[in-house]
Image (cartoon, rainbow, N blue to C red):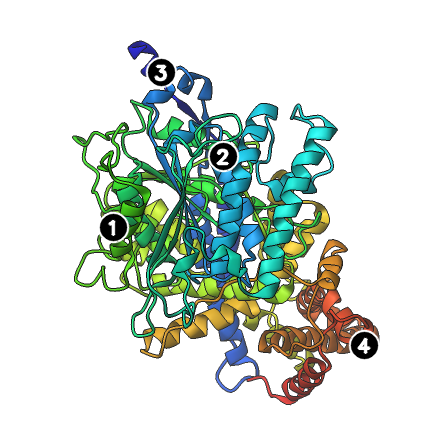
Amino acid sequence: MAERRLLSLFGTERAKGRTAYKLFASSMLVSICLVLFYRATNIPGRGEQGRWAWMGMLAAELWFTFYWIITQSVRWNPIYRHTFKERLSEIDDSELPGLDIFVCTADPVAEPPALVISTVLSVMAYDYPPEKLSVYLSDDAGSELTFYALWEAAQFARHWLPFCRRHKVEPRSPAAYFSSRSHPCDTCNDTERSYMKNLYKEMESRIDAVVMLGKVHEDLRARKGFSEWKSGMTSRNHQPIVQILTDSSDKSSVDDDGTALPTLVYMAREKRPQHHHNFKAGAMNALIRVSSLISNSPVILNVDCDMYSNNVESIRDALCFFLDEEKGHDIGFVQFPQNYENNTKNDLYGNAFKVINAVELAGLDSWGGPLYIGTGCFHRREVLCGRKYSKDYKEDWKRETKRKKEDTAFILEERAKSLATCTYEHNTPWGNEMGLQYGCPVEDVITGLAIQCRGWRSVYFNPPRKGFLGVAPSTLAETLVQHKRWSEGNFQIFLSKYCSFLQGHGKLKLGLQMAYCIYGLWAPNSIPTLYYVTIPSLSLLKGISLFPKVSSPWIIPFAYVAIAKNAYGLVESLACGDTLIGWWNIQRMWLLKRITSYLYGTVDAILKVMGFPRTGFTITAKMADADASKRYEQEIMEFGSSSSSPMFVVIATTALLNLLCLVVGLQRLVADWDFGDQFLIQLLLCGVVVALNLPIYEALFLRKDKGRMAPAVTCISLGFTAVAYLLPIV
């Protein structure tokens, strides 16, 4: 057995075709340099019209060049991992490490309890010894509605878990399983499936009824745990609550087959108005402490409450990396990709992230590991607690909690509460040297960076069957708000001491430092992009040429850069599984996010650096109304006729401005064909922007449904377009 354990538990393959790609990238770099040379040597003289517009184009193109070079870090040499789970199966179950699973929720309205408990049930049902599994739900709202849903889930698990084992069910989220029309892999007959579905629907109906009522029934108050909720409690002002609903060490805590149930724990850390709670990072740190008292497993998995387990083998996949005796000693965490189950066929809002998942994160892995994206990630507990990597360190995979036999669930609950108070972390390393780090909306990224700077590496694993599936935003507004938060947080990191070039200097490879900046610099991309889609169009109106003539040989590098970059992007996107229409939708969302989400993210990040109050954390809603959901399924963009979001004003104004400029430009082209020789590139650029914005024009003027653009947005945007038309170009 010792010899077998020396066999590698995972393998690594390098991406094919890298030589061809490097030749392509080199040709792109030469062409970009020619573009910049032309731009720098043809600046209009002092007093000439368009001088400053030209210099602005030079600045924008310099930025795009810099950012393009940054992005090459993840495309230079991506690597792909695969595991040998059959070798891991030779290890006796008793030798496998325990696993603590953290699920975080923060709002029972934005994150419905029925959705949350479906995720909890999916991770309770992993193909793993149940006595080695402990599942913790952190409820940052301290809602009795969520606790009631978890209590119901604990009862349902007694039926659901043996059903899953017996029939090899996948996925093991009951909501996902019963919403699917086909179940090709399981062995269940229709009668038993129907019986289990009825049990689930009855539980779901009871939960929804309690949520609609806004409180639990009085007859439940006498049951264990419900007495914690007293009058006067709010989501921002309540005592710590820890409740063990099932305990794998309790012989009475078994399912219908007599098999032990995984430990299931509810935690709501203390909240007081006068104490900052540090959002999700604070919740995770409280979970680390509470779980160390109850189960203290050496491996921790954390998932978002809407990110259910879609692969029963995910734990064993992750352990193949940690337990590999030759290559696993320095692996701090294993990151799975973030995938969504509700993406439309053509990825209407660009939320599938197929290129990021298939190329960019694999490219990060080649430099020392992907960033920590906050969900679907397996950690060594010791690493999360601040341990630095050392060649001498040996993980104790068999370690157990210090819990004594006489410690009942009640005793553990009372002890654990003291670890979840809002003052526990005062004057301690928590949030800095221990646990998830504080001070940034994307605490996961700086935490992963800190782990890598302590000498650990991370691993990216993207199995054929997705490990986790979540719920993507299904409206444009939700998507833009989510990306505003992400881009703002990542830009804050870039502007802070946590910048990968500063914190990672001398600790991380240059390629990894650059790769972190791909996301750190999402936000400032907004300014040159907004410039590029407005100034050339306005210059077209004013008769100011900003590009070489078609008859000039200098047109060649401009044309090559534009065509080659987009052609490669199309091929890459199709190779990663996108459709042709999907690629076009991604280009549209790339534009919309840059001129709105990233622009607002840039402004807010800079304001914060200047000392203005920090931006509050925004939870992305997980549910949409029926009409909006139907439009989403039909791939019709959702604007909301009652929404006058400033982001929509920016989008509509940009779209209308380019439409006006294109119409005027085409009129001049028809009147004078020589106009095309001088302004063809600006006409084409304007035309591409108009083509991308076709759904915007439809929402502004043609649609009558509730998802159209608000009339107020149309009026304001027309006004801004008229003002922009009158502005001079200098």
CA distance separating discs 3 and 4: 71 Å
Under circle 2, the secondary element is: helix
Under circle 4, the secondary element is: helix
Residue in front for this viewpoint, 199 or 102? 199
CA distance separating discs 3 and 2: 29 Å
The x, y position of residue 554, in whole percent, is 59, 60
- At label 4, the amino acid type is Gln
Is label 4 or label 1 in front?
Answer: 1
Give the residue at x 61% y 70%.
533
CA distance separating discs 1 and 3: 43 Å
Residue 667: image tag:
4
CA distance separating discs 4 and 2: 46 Å
Assess disc 1: are there few (<14), some (14-19) or many (≥20) residues with their C-alpha within 10 Å of its C-alpha. some
Dot 2 corresponds to which residue? 18
Dot 3 corresponds to which residue? 7
Q: Are marks 3 and 2 in contact (CB under 8 Å)?
A: no
Mark closest to the chain's N terminus, 3 or 4: 3
Residue 415: image tag:
1
Mark closest to the chain's N terminus, 4 or 2: 2
Residue 694: image tag:
none
- At label 1, the amino acid type is Arg
The x, y position of residue 168, in whole percent, is 59, 26
- At label 2, the amino acid type is Arg
Is label 3 or label 4 in front?
Answer: 3
Is label 2 or label 1 in front?
Answer: 1
- At label 3, the amino acid type is Leu
Assess disc 2: are there few (<14), some (14-19) or many (≥20) residues with their C-alpha within 10 Å of its C-alpha. some
| Left or right: 367 as drawn, with respect to 601 | left
Mark closest to the chain's N terminus, 1 or 3: 3
